[in-house]
Amino acid sequence: MAHKAGRVAVVLNGNARQVTDQLVESFDHVVGSGDLFLSRSLDEAQGIALSIVENGYQVVLTGGGDGTFVQMVTAITKEAKCRGQDPPRFGLLKLGTGNSLAWALGAGTTREGVFADLAKVSRHSASRDFRLIEVQGLLTPFAGAGFDALGLKHFHEVRSALGRLPFVGKRATGAASYAVSIPTRTIPELALRRRMGVRIINRGEDVARLDDEGRPTGEPISNGNVIYEGECIAALVSTIPYWGFGVKVFPFADERPSDRFCLRVVATHPLHIAAHMLSVWNGTYRHRDLLDFHADDVELEFDEPTAIEIGGDPAGMTRSMRAHLHPEPIKLIDYSAV
């Protein structure tokens, strides 16, 4: 095979709503021949990862949302490690639904912005080290159980229903689907159902509890001790501030130590959250039952099988979830410098 170290590989999620035949054709004109990959399944993603590592690409851009990024970074990084190679640098093209990482990295948020990002990126582009969390074998910037996993389920149901309406169809955006699903489906269901029971144990270095300003407070929680035990509506981990659409769910992520991720336990009542959605959106929501920590390795034990999400994609039901900071940072394209 020809070595392609001087080229940029672009991997698009063929299932993403924005990745149309017309868009793929447009990308094919911009990207060098053989450097555009279209993935529609996990098996295809594994094959693409193998091809990218074998061909020695130094930069890989993913388009199709956070889930596409998680899938490709995990597969490519593992394949490179098996071969004793350094993984390539990675970048985001905002072509999915939530695109939390696109918000965190300053990637273009319009179609024109996406092509502008693509045109500027090369193997010489500036990059920065970025830490990911390993959750159930996947490398991801965020994951969680409870509110977010249920919200994703409702989002997909509402988007599918809106897409079948004759006067809406493909014009039903992800933001519109979330705007409908969260207040009409997710919050009412959370208000009526029994809350999630979870026991969170520290499996790593000392965990710091944070005050309302994001500063460590109280005694650190040492290895093997319980960080939280009780009922809540969500337990979340992240190394970036944002959830989908710029919702600042982790306001203390930017100030975290580089060897820690954010752990947030949401034990407040869902109706109280609904009444303060603006402050939730911009990251200023505070409550005595909203608990924040800095940790590097935690285990979540649920009192019954619970839905989880990893990188914005549903990840099934489980009785436990392990989240630990991946030891090796990846290199991400710094869009503010390209």
Image (tube, rainbow, N blue to C red):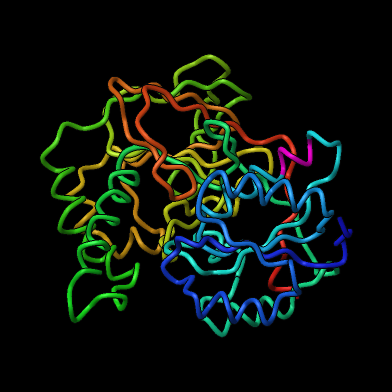
Q: Is residue 245 above or below residue 1?
A: below
**Range covered by the magenta-colored residues:** 77-81
Question: Which residue is at the front of the view, 217 or 138?
Answer: 138
Residue depicted at x 31% and y 39%: 146
Residue 16 image position (x, y, % from top left):
45, 63
Examine the image and state in which quarter residue 7 appears. bottom right
Assign the magenta stretch its main secondary structure: helix
Which residue lies most toward the top here?
Answer: 224
Question: Which residue is at the front of the view, 315 or 26?
Answer: 26
**Which corner quadrant holds the C terminus?**
bottom right
Residue 175 image position (x, y, % from top left):
33, 69
Which residue lies most toward the front here?
Answer: 1
Residue 31 image position (x, y, % from top left):
71, 75
Residue 169 image position (x, y, % from top left):
26, 75
Is residue 242 covered in magenta?
A: no
Residue depicted at x 69% and y 48%: 49
Residue depicted at x 42% and y 38%: 315
Across the whole image, how many numbered discs are drawn on residues? 0
Is residue 253 found left or right of 244 in the rendered image? right
Residue depicted at x 29% and y 56%: 156
Question: Which residue is at the front of the view, 202 or 184?
Answer: 184
**Which corner quadrant holds the N terminus?**
bottom right
Which residue lies most toward the bottom here?
Answer: 112
Q: Is residue 101 above or below residue 114?
A: above
Q: Is residue 291 above or below residue 90?
A: above
Q: Is residue 233 above or below residue 58?
A: above
Is residue 338 found left or right of 276 in the rendered image? right
Is residue 328 found left or right of 47 in the rendered image? right
Is residue 266 found left or right of 193 in the rendered image? right
